[in-house]
Amino acid sequence: MSRFFPLRVLLMLVFAFLPLSKAAAANADRFQFNHDIQVQPDERVGDVTCLNCSIYVRGQVSGDVTVINGNIVGEQGSMVGGDIIAIHGNVRAESGSQVGGDLTAIAGTARRDAQATVGGDVTSMGGGGWVLLIFLVPFAILGGIVALIIWLIQRSRRPAQVPAYTLHRN
């Protein structure tokens, strides 16, 4: 075995994975909290997620675009390969934009211009009641189950009381 064998193996691995790392960097995912995301016309990204902020797409997104408590705007010439989802926010697909999946707004409105292309469904569940229904009702049911379990445990720990009429009489 050659003394340079480990070096050769290392170089082969580096050259084998170098194209993959460049492809991953070209389609990197983006996440922001409290700061708007803008995908420029010359950018290509993967999934885009934003909490408490808005997303403005002018370029290409190969994955999904998701916002909680914010808006999504697909501007002219934008392309989104996956779904666009806004919870407690609005979605707008302007003229010339393309969406491969669904366009969904929960507790907000979904608007699509006539020249915008959407491959899936356009769904708008306006009003804040949907947020209560989706998030708070399951917690209320879970709380009821926990309260029932606690009540059953406390009930099983109490000593059984014998009614007075079952005592012996002489």
Image: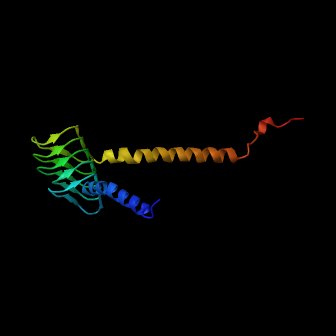
Which of the pair 91/26 is nearer the observer? 26
Asked if residue 56 can be seen in this view, the reply is: yes
Which is nearer the eye, 90 or 13?
Answer: 13
Name the image quarter holding residue 12: bottom left
**Quadrant of the image occupied by residue 4:** bottom left
Most extreme residue toward the right is: 170
| Residue 68 percent location from the top left of the image | 30, 53
Which residue sits at x=20%, y=59%?
Answer: 38
- 14 sits left or right of 98 in the view: right
Q: Residue at x 64, y 46 (%)?
A: 153
| Numbered-mark total | 0
Q: Position of residue 117 (x, y in %)?
A: 15, 40
Q: Which x, y percent locates residue 162?
A: 76, 40
Colour convention = rainbow
Q: Is residue 99 left or right of 152 when viewed as pictured?
A: left
Query: Which residue is at the front of the view, 146 or 11?
Result: 11
Q: Quadrant of the C terminus?
A: top right
Residue 32 in picture, x, y percent from top left: 29, 60
Q: Extreme front residue here?
A: 1
> Which of 43/117 is in front?
43
Residue 51 seen from this side? no
